[in-house]
Image (cartoon, rainbow, N blue to C red):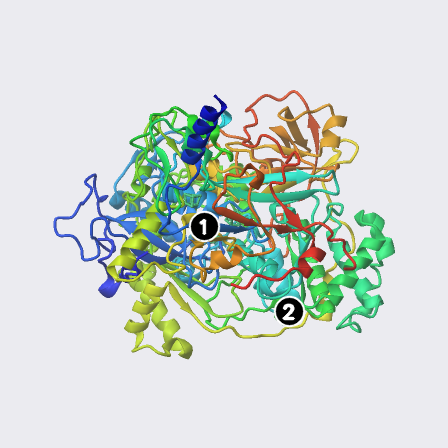
Amino acid sequence: MKRRDFLKFIGIGGVGAGAGFVLGKVSKPPGAKLIPYLIPPEDIIPGVATWYASVCTLCGAGCGTLVRVMEGRAKKVEGNPGHPINRGGLCALGQSSVQALYNPDRITKPLKRKGPRGSGEYAEITWDEALKTLAANLIELKSKNESEKFHLLTSPLGGTIDRLAGEFVSAFGSSNYSHYGLFQRKNLAFANLSTMGTASIPHYDIENTKYLLSFGADFSSTWVSPVNYSNGYGKMRQGTGERGKLVQVEPRLSLTGANADEWVPAKPGTEALLALAIANTIVEKGLARDASAWRGVLSRYKAKDMASICDVPVERIEAMAVEFARTRPSLAIAGDSVSSYENGISGAIAVNILNQVAGNIGVIGGVMPNGDDLGNGKKIDFGRKISTLISAANADKIKTLIVYGANPVFTTPKAARLEEALSKVPFIASFSSFMDETTAHADIILPAHTSLEDWGDDFPDPGVAAPVASIIQPVVSPVFETKSLGDIFIELARAVGGNVAGKITAPNFAEYLKASWKGLYSRNREMAAGTLGFEDFWNKALQRGGWWGPSRKMTATVSARAGEHLTGAPARFEGEEAQYPFYLIPYAQTAYMDGRGANLPWLQELPDPMTSVVWGTWVEINPKTAASLGLKEGDMVNIESPFGKISAPVYLYPGIRPDTVAVPIGQGHSHYGRYAKGRGANPIEILPYKEDPLSGEAALNSTRVRITRGATGERLVKMEGSTKEFGRGIVQTVSPSEFKRMKKEVV
Amino acid sequence: MSGLLERIAGKLRSYREPGYYTKLDHKWTMVIDLDKCNGCEACVVACYAENNLPVVGREECEKSRAFSWLRIERYVEGEYPDVKVKFIPVMCQHCMKAPCETGCPVYATYHNQDGLNVQVYNRCVGTFTCATYCTYDVRRFNWFTYKWPKPLEAQLNPDVSVREMGVMEKCTFCIQRIRSAKDTAKDESRPVKDGDIKPACSQSCPTGAIYFGDIQDPESVVAKLAKSPRRYRLLEELNADPSVIYLKRVMGDGTSSHE
Ligand code: SF4
Ligand code: SF4
Ligand code: SF4
């Protein structure tokens, strides 16, 4: 990478000189010629790469990126080494964002439905017609005084675009703007709100901890902020200090669990009780930093009583408690095996209490609260729920629905009967650039840019106990006739007219964004340091990828009232044990996440890290269980819950409890392009419709299933030959005690 | 008679002795810390993106024809609940005594002045000899000329040639990045510095497990890490003299309460 070619920036005067296009207009694709410009813009030098700083939006973590662009085409997305979230790394999903940009199955133009809903038959229309049609529909709604019957449903957007979308909805006269995503981790945020007073996820300082107790947090693949945590993990293991230890509590060994020093396969649904039993033991043994407030609350959770419920020997609970309290600093994190249950908030609170008792809150190597000192962070609105939308639709309270980014038809259980609810909505518009399962229900599609073509910003939640504000900038001109998401709202506001147009007056989203940053800049004096006014700050921020300040140490205390939220009982699973003998664990896998990665060919062909399976779904079964059912690897089975049935081939997996089966989420698409469509099965389909009444988070671990033979379908394709080394010493190890005696390499 | 045999054997040996370079310009070396690697496979995707690796599809994957130049091998020991899992990223080991180089009838694969095992695509006639000789199963063969559905081809890296049917390929240590770092250094009239070159896999790695540099430079990070007591090389006893050094994973006696 040439230093002098590094971090070119664009954005002066609102003209995207870098990518050779003018904002607010849809330009033609750069064309088939290698050098498409007669007079090349200054930073298009044939054969020389330009790097633009931006942000990955493939999940909510907000990793900073540097995108390599040559001849106006994006070549590679890399992690921005200067960005405090990811510090140079980038996960498999994030790197594949360039295959979303150049996906052969993108929606290239606005579309209008031709056939019946869900048929996928559409006719191409112009942007003008598309905007007019949608505006006419909205105007009609308004004229009938039915503004409240307009709903907007998006993925958990943040920052300036979220504000613009919110302004649009409220200026129109509606209060119905919801966010939906399968992995919003709202239980975690809610637990923090009710125990520490902030509805955000703190920074988990994995890097500096010496004992990491993870309750099913699979941060090596997709959990919350995977690149940040993995970076910390690398340093925890082999950094400058003493090597930290990882203990993983989960019924099915995840990728992170596979790296743990110890695996504690507690019974599904009892992990919160285990956390409380550990906390109680710490208090009873006099090892607590903060005991007095908790003695009463915790006394119900005696290790000897919890041991049999949790299926973890009492000696082990006690040993964990002692080690957790004595090792300084230690840290417990509440992943899916404690928080993705019907009483998930209770589980997340239990882990907060454990951290409080052990004295891990507000310390380096522990839980470091994140402030919202930029005044622009993602505000989690717990009222924005998918259930609200479903019941409104069923009660004919939605006449017009706009969907963007969220794909609830794929990510809600069949039991939610979302498709039926959508059929009652007279008019559905989608702003998606991909024909996902929800977009396939739309009457009209106004495709938005992918993030590599659009403007935006991001205020990562969780942050890193330091203020972080990142800018998303377009790195290439639009590949197809799509529009900036912000511009769609702005142009729609103009077309709707009236007070909507009166409220949203920015000429385009790039200007709106810049104005919003001007406000941010004027409110935060730290930003002004070392800059010559806003323009200078803005240009520097574009070059750097954003602005981030020094870390600040904040403290918090888990309020003793937290105890009120504990349910004190194991989480409930639907289905009688006699009929449905196995717990079902649907999990987010490295490549597909909530299903969004399934249309990217690199990710379909990326072997699953634990099973090496490609291009399909599988069900993980303990070899002993499989033997008792007469099943061998590759056999097709039905996985049946009280709510439905899917089928998948068997993968024999010793890292799972014998009473549990696990299926990765992400395949089983009925739409979503050639790479995803008609492949594998979607375990979410057979879940009960359960949403936490307080947080709105879906409960993934919530049903039992039975396994039966006789299914037909795709064969298991896996890349591995064997899981054994046959004594060849391929992955060599040293024991921790041996390691302690070794001289450390100095680099 | 035995004297003659001896002489022939001596000739063969000297031919196979990698003494034909008396001095290397660089000796590019990779160090992979298995105690950091968590098996996330970000590096695998980085290699696809950087090196124009084709996606072959489900049916071809079933025939073990996937193109990954870099794979994460995963080993599982023990039975529930005492299961131990280990990961190791494996790519071309750029052996200094590379078995693959001895077999190629057209010298398509040879050792260069930088200590790299390189593959000349235009020379390769697809005999498959090198892949058969390879100790580490890292060579990939173009059974077809693969296509990228439009507009996916816009992503292809112009610094790396797109290969055609009949050609063998494998990890190059991202030779295009090495070359471009050398060019930049030359433009700036200075030698290549430690840290100038990051192969795609190393750049992307979230845990920072992959280090790269010139082991001939005693101040380089890899030269220092190569002295680690955790150091070992893959199937070292086979004597291929690989340029990839692994640092052992710390695991084993991690029982809970005490130490
Ligand atoms: S974790 Fe991965 S998908 Fe999420 S923002 Fe970072 S690179 Fe993108
Ligand atoms: S990216 Fe790094 S941590 Fe992930 S598998 Fe590769 S070497 Fe291991
Ligand atoms: S060094 Fe380059 S070619 Fe080799 S595995 Fe890494 S990314 Fe692939």
Residue A401, horizontal then vertical, whole percent: 43, 46
Disc 2 target residue: A196
Point 37% across, 49% down: residue: B24
Q: What crowding class fits label 1: few (fewer than 14 Cα within 10 Å), some (14-19), or many (20 or more)? A: many
Is ligand 3 within 8 Å of the beta carbon of the residue shown at mark 1? no
A734 left or right of A515? right
Q: Is residue A475 visible?
A: no
Q: Amino acid at mark 2?
A: Met
A532 left or right of A402? left
Residue furthest to the right: A304
Residue A29, horizontal then vertical, whole percent: 23, 43
Disc 1 target residue: B29
> Whole-Å distance between the Cαs marked 1 and 2?
49 Å
Element carrying mark 2: helix
Element carrying mark 1: strand
Q: Amino acid at mark 1?
A: Thr
Query: In the rendered image, which quarter is residue A7 located in?
Result: bottom left
**Foreground pick, A243 / B100:** B100
Q: Is residue A538 visible?
A: yes
A343 left or right of A58? right
Residue A696, horizontal then vertical, whole percent: 59, 53
Q: Is residue A479 above or below residue A42?
A: above
Q: Identify the subunit bearing mark 1.
A: B
